[in-house]
Image (cartoon, rainbow, N blue to C red):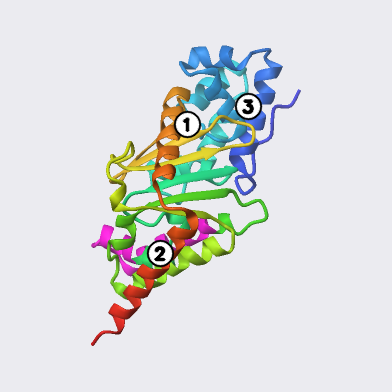
Amino acid sequence: MPGPKDLDPSSSPRALLGAELRHARERAGLSQEELGTPLFVSGSFIGQLEAGTRRMHLEYARQIDELLGTDGFFERNCAAIAKSKYPDHFAEAAEAESIATAIREYAPLLIPGLLQAPEYARAIFRDGRPRATDEAIGELVATRLERAHLLTGPTSPLLWAILDEAVLRRKVGGPAVMSEALRHVVAVAHKCRAVIQVLPFEAGGHMAMGGSLKLMEFENAPPLAYLEGFRIGRLEDDPASVTEYQLAYDLLGASALSPRESLALIEAVAEDYAHEEQQP
């Protein structure tokens, strides 16, 4: 009986790989928990691989081939789709984001990538990579803008972003860039592509002061949380931990300005930047 065919990396490779994993596991008569035990992972982790919300790493692929007798199928295809245009610490989160049904994000310092205007993104990358060539910066900007197309598709996820007031006040790229960037955020919200709130300075301390937080929900898989710092990131799937992060986000939303008040503030700050740019 012929084995499974190698996957086409151009067509939802993680979803296809996950479907093949489910098929091979069920053919072997194993539950998700039974397959996870020799891999030292939970049954829910296997479920996330099958749903395509987690990336299959090479070490797991090799063991799965051995356990399920799939003749190197998962190792071959895992290696074929492993390359990503995103940094290593963000690649898996970006892949999960692309199939999420809802994304909720708290941004303490920067406008979230999905909401960034081109020149703001360029300023972010230039400040973060002072030795990079203009060509390299241009490629990074193009990749970020391509990722934002997630919000314009027919099945775009709900995006709910809470911006700390510091995001509005930090003058990235100068007043003209900031004015354009904030107006872009407002435009996305007005197109009903995102819900935006601002957490004002007067709200004081909160649970998420340690850094940014992204929560992702999926149609057929448990939610994930993504925590990011300086050139590092971690995808969290432990249910108890994700529940704590969800509570933190809910409390942030309760302390933030309403969406209407938030957009009014963002527009006012954008106008202030525009006036500043016009000053001699």
Q: Which mark is residue 47?
A: none
Q: Amino acid at mark 3?
A: Leu
Q: Amino acid at mark 2?
A: Ile
Q: Amino acid at mark 1?
A: His
Say if 243 sits above or below 149 in the image. Answer: above
- Residue 193: x and y in percent read 57, 57
- Quadrant of the snapshot with the N terminus: top right
Q: Which mark is residue 266?
A: 2
Q: CA distance from mark 1 to mark 2?
A: 41 Å
- Residue 13: x and y in percent read 60, 41
Residues at circles 1 and 2 in contact by the CB criterion of under 8 Å: no
- Residue 102: x and y in percent read 56, 43
Query: Is disc 1 placed on a helix, strand or loop?
Result: loop
Say if 212 sits above or below 23 in the image. Answer: below
Q: Give whichever of discs 3 and 2 has the lower sequence position.
A: 3
Near mark 3 (Cα within 10 A), the count class, few <14, some 14-19 or many ≥20, is many
- Residue 46: x and y in percent read 56, 23
Residue at horizontal 68 percent and vertical 12 percent from the top:
29
Query: Is disc 2 placed on a helix, strand or loop?
Result: helix
Q: Give whichever of discs 1 and 2 has the lower sequence position.
A: 1
Residue at horizontal 55 percent and vertical 35 percent from the top:
53
Magenta residues span 123-148
Residues at circles 3 and 2 in contact by the CB criterion of under 8 Å: no
Whether residue 130 is in magenta: the answer is yes
Please identify the quarter of the rendering in which residue 47 is found. Answer: top right
Q: CA distance from mark 3 to mark 1?
A: 13 Å
Q: Please tell me which residue lies in front, 70 or 181.
A: 181
Taking the image as shown, residue 74 lies to the left or right of residue 128, namely: right
Give the labeled residue for mark 1.
57
Can residue 143 be seen here? The reply is no
